[in-house]
Amino acid sequence: MNTEQLKAFVQVAREGRLTVAARQLGVSQPGLSRQLQALETELGVRLLVRTPGGAVLTDAGERFLPHARRALEALAAGTAELGALTTTPRGTVALGTLQSVGTYLLPELVRAFKDHYPEVLPRLSEGTHEELEARVAGGALDLCIVNLPMRRVDLVAQKLWEEELVLAVPRGHRLTKLKRPVALAEVVEEPLVVIPGMAGTHALEAACEARGLKPRVAVEMDNAEGLRRMVERGLGVALLPGLMARDHASRGFDVVEVEKGGPRRQVALVHRGEEYLTAAARALKTFIVDSLRRSRP
């Protein structure tokens, strides 16, 4: 049994004549007859009887007609709902981000997005690069914002921006007083606040190794916000994304630029492919890309 058979039956029941029903359905009369015969064979009963005055429903046809109509109405409603899902931005969209992006970029961006799309509910979560990629690949997230390069080759990445890493130092630190960009070699003897595995940590470790020194790690953190706060308390220095240092004047730390050629990060928006995105996810993706194109972080 299929929808074409149900449509053929309902149309003939409505019109009473096969020729009229066939014309309205855009099929040939023999083709319509075959659809009806296939439906009757599937059900094991006669639904229609042809008479000189037209097609007449049998008792079985009368009983089956309301069910056929409800089935077609339910299918049409389901199709319309899916169509709205793929064309009208509404419902939930799951976005995962690195903490630095979630804390320092998304609040204002999401507020502006909600002004444009009040029927979309952004569901935000934070995680490591590997966690976020895995959740997008598995369908738990629609989108994620992570640093390049990508670990997986089955995902689509669109670069959003590139930024330098800068040194965050306690207020009044000696490096601030130099009033110039510094080389990482000038930092290797400082107590360090690090997040293991991050690009900034690797850069500091490499600088120490080049000088034959072991990094003086004062504190290890698992999140960027905590790292910044440790610097504010004077526990050491840290390499931060430029995004996190924009408001340093109102915080308890100073920012020192790193010499040209220092560590950088590239940030990208990642998803499984356009065909997997709902209208809400596409709207958020486009809004993020367009907003950052107009105003870089």
Image: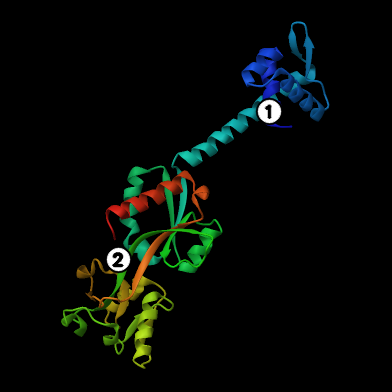
Residue 149 relative to residue 70: left or right: left
Left or right for 265, reference 255 = right
The x, y position of residue 175, in whole percent, is 21, 83
**Dot 1 lies on which element?**
helix
Q: Which mark is residue 4?
A: 1
Residue 161 locus on image (x, y percent): 34, 61
Is residue 250 positioned above or below 96 on the image?
below
Label 2, secondary structure: give it: helix
Specify the color scheme: rainbow
Q: Quadrant of residue 61?
A: top right
Q: On screen, 229 above or below 275? A: below
Dot 1 or dot 2, earlier in sequence: 1
Residue 175 visible in the displayed image: yes
Q: Position of residue 119 (x, y in %)?
A: 41, 42
Look at label 2 and name its amino acid: Leu
Pointer 2 residue? 243
Report whether 144 appears left or right of 42.
left
Residue at the farthest top position:
52
Which residue corresponds to the image point at 36% horizontal and 89% vertical from the top-left?
210
Cα distance in 3D space between marks 1 and 2: 57 Å
The mark lying in front, picked from 1 and 2, is 1
